[in-house]
Amino acid sequence: MSAPIIELRQVHKWFARFHVLRAIDLSVKAGERIVICGPSGSGKSTLIRCINRLETHQKGTIIVDGIELTERTRDIEAVRRKVGMVFQQFNLFPHLTALQNCTLAPIWVQGLPKRAAEEAAMRYLERVRIPEQAHKYPGQLSGGQQQRVAIARALCLNPKIMLFDEPTSALDPEMIKEVLDVIVELAESGMTMLCVTHEMGFARRVADRVIFMDEGEIVEAAPPERFFGAPENERTRQFLSQVLAH
Amino acid sequence: MTRGHAPNGPPPLPRGPIAWARRHLFNTWYNAILTLGALYLIALGLKAAIGWIIVDAVWLGGSEACHAAKGEGACWALIAEKHRFILFGTYPYEEQWRPALAVALFVAAVGLSTWRRLWSRALVVGWFVLFAALALLLHGGVFGLTPVSTELWGGLPLTILLSVIGIGLSLPLAVLLALGRRSSMPLIRAISVGYIELVRGVPLISILFMASVMFPLFLPEGVTINKLLRAQVGIILFSAAYLAEVVRGGLQAIPSGQYEAADALGLGYWRKMRLVILPQALRLVIPPMVNSFIATFKDTSLVIIIGLYDLLGAVRTATNDPLWRAFTTEGYIFVAAIFFVFCSFMSRYSRRLEQGAGERRPQ
Amino acid sequence: MVERPPGGAWVWLGSRGARAIVYQTLVIAALGALGYYLVANTLDNLASRNIATGFGFLDREAGFPIAEHAVAYSPASSYGRAYLVGILNTLQVAAIGIGLATVLGTLVGIARLSSNWLIARLASSYIGVLRNIPLILQLFFWYGLVLALPGPRDALEAVGGHVYLSNRGFAFALPGFDSVHAWALILVGLGIVAAIGFGIFVRWRQARSGRRLPVFWPAVAFTIGPAAILFAASGAPLDWQRPALTGFNIVGGGRLSPEFFALVFGLTTYTAAYIAEVVRAGILAVPRGQSEAALALGLGRGRMLRFVILPQALRLIVPPATNQYLNLTKNSSLAVGIGYQELVSIGNTTINQTGQAIEGIAMIMAVYLTISLTISALMNLYNRRIALKVR
């Protein structure tokens, strides 16, 4: 492993007067799996949304796979093609079928033939175990199924990096597992991923590094054994005692 | 949470008018072009408008002064000369303090009613009493007031009267129609749907024509009702259909749990509606009801078509005077300004209600 | 149920079904009685005024002129014919008004959402002013402005005498007919077919190879290219029939009357203010997550709008916009105030001349109801087709 695939140096961001990200330094190696946790409002979603520039940072540098994120639209779109994103609220396009959701970007962004795009999409839908739902509309699917379609949609662009923004927070408890299983499988295949989540069991199982954020700062970053076993920071300990209490 | 900026962190955004303009007017090249183009057009428009409305306008004097300045500036002398007629129509000149007082009382009452604290049953009763009093004030014949026949009523008081009574009296009918439309009895539902869709499908003018030419045919020989009352009935029947749909929206928004809870308490249909459902539903639809009121307020100006002299009718009559005929535009602008003030006040108020809905609950 | 005295009849009356029957019977009886009373009175009144009921009057000679008619009409034509002219005039105003109001309303609605503060402010002032002044007043105002224009002798002239604006309306040049025009039109028709064929080819090629060709400009070229070449090659025979001042009036070319001009202008600007709000609300109602997801997939702004935002916004915009179209159609009846002769105006004249109030108003209402119900039915069909599928 050589140069990091994602590199953030001294990244700052403000929402109006509110300082959401403070001097973030983070570098991610290809194939690394990172779980980010922290109390709500700590800036963890904002952090990963900066990586594909759904949010703009105001200070510092972000480099993704050799491309620095600036105002240049061309660069931004190039980065977005390499980075897949899965949202908390799925954000599937309700007027398109599951299959069409998956083929839209390959056809229009990558210029794939429709047939090829559909075949690839079917492969990914099989991988998330819902090929039989391909011709249904998002409104006809359960939350867990929708989130799996959303994962397939992101994978269809063959991304090098996957971002997960609390992928299971909007799901009913019985559906969390089916989605996590898919993500675990993806992790095991060697995909670089950053996942914001409160699922600590998942973090223990797949993460190479767990990052704890609070008030816009990275408070602690450590491999799961050390993170859960012997957290260094008081704030981390407090947070863990709250999440792991039940 | 606030710890100030990070050391040597920049202030998030530069402040000051130049930074503001950069962000909001010149943030992209096409926005810069749009801004400059719009500024140019605004400057042209303002220059022409200020010249016509203020600098070259004739403020006082007779129509000769206006004719002398024809084309250059507005003739506000028309308003100076005719404003009493425009505002109060053919109401006897010496008695015009009465409609003036009525309008003042109305505006005061509206002002009071916008105050949420005062919303209560008493306020509704108060409005009925107020309107009876205002009608009495205009009509005269008691307390030593000279009687003034309704044929002579006109101008702003007429506009207000027609629209407020129109909405006030159409509400009960609208509630019945809305309940009917949601009724489980097929005939009742069919009648309500038929009425609502029929009225909403045709223009108000056709209803007003109906009121003016067909009502007289409906009544037994020898019984006549005056034109004002006919127009009023037409407006009530018309706005009831629209208001019924508004009320229906409120009824649909009440969660079914409320109906079930009322049923579980053993309340009959009418009690359930009166005590549980309607109070909530009507409260919910106050903002759209204000919008209906604005629509009715604007619509009343159509009575001019059947020969009543509301604000618009009065200004048309005023500028029919051969001396002033060239200056109808000024008259229209004056009346438009009055309508604009009333309507935009109400629409702003309804928007505020919408935004603040459910905000001020007792803690 | 609260206590009731026991007994067969009471129990029966207390049941829900029975009560429903009783209520409905009572309402019908009351309505029937009211109807009977009104009809009886009306018949009495008609008899005493010697007015015959029925639609026989439609065949009689109308005797009044109609300035603008899409089908042949003269005062010697029948009332029925006059009604037909009125209906056509109403439909014409409505169709033109709807088209223009849609374009203007969409522009203003998008301007209202602009990131440019000044543009957004201008759009919202436009909406505020137009919505808060009665339409009839606006029509009077515009009509007054048109009438205040200089007379035909001093008409405002533009485009080198091709366009005249005066208090007699808006006169414009029309190209005189030439056989080349017909051929050019045929070529445009063929061009459209070719453009559609090209679109299908591009799609087919994309599905096979993934390579995409531009569609829009080639389609434009296909549509107007051959016709333009033919037109230019044959020496661009236009032979403008220009309006010209003859005596006291401007004749020749095409002409829009001041009434028509003011009516369409007023209806368009007024309705556009409402459509703008509909468009704005529709676009705003598409959740932000949708555009974020599209951007995250690397779709640019243009494709995001085309494939994700617009299809969803349209679903929300079309039903309320149709409502505004219906309002515009109904509002066209205000033409009676400025003397453009459409359905209501002609109906009113007919009623005044014949005294056939009931028939006259019934016909007006029937036409509007037909239009309203047809459009609502089409709308329901459309809504059912585009409704998002949910469980």
Image (spheres, coloured by chain):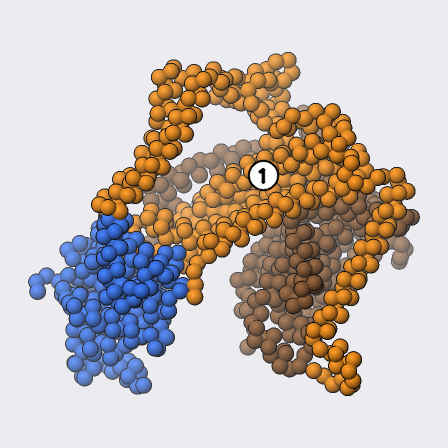
Chain colours: A blue, B brown, C orange
Give the residue drawn at x 70%, y 42%: C364
Query: For the residue labelled by badge 1, is the local secondary structure a helix, a strand or a loop?
Result: helix
Give the residue drawn at x 70%, y 73%: C17
Give the residue drawn at x 60%, y 17%: C251
- The crowd level at tag 1 (other Cα within 10 Å; few <14, some 14-19, many 20+) is many
Residue C260: in sight, yes or no? yes
Residue at the limit of the structure toward the left, as seen here: A2
Q: Nearer the viewer, residue B54 or C282?
A: C282
* Left or right, B21 with reference to C333: left
Residue at the limit of the structure toward the front, as seen here: C8
Give the residue drawn at x 41%, y 23%: C184
**What is the x, y in percent for residue B353?**
57, 62
* Left or right, A222 with reference to B347: left
Q: Nearer the viewer, residue C59 or A128?
A: C59
* Left or right, C244 with reference to A202: right
Instruction: Report the amino acid beneath label 1.
Output: Ala
Residue at the limit of the structure toward the top, as seen here: C247
State which quarter of the image contains the C terminus of chain A: bottom left
Q: Which residue is mark 1?
A: C94
- Chain letter of mark 1 equals C
Q: Nearer the viewer, residue B66 or C317?
A: C317
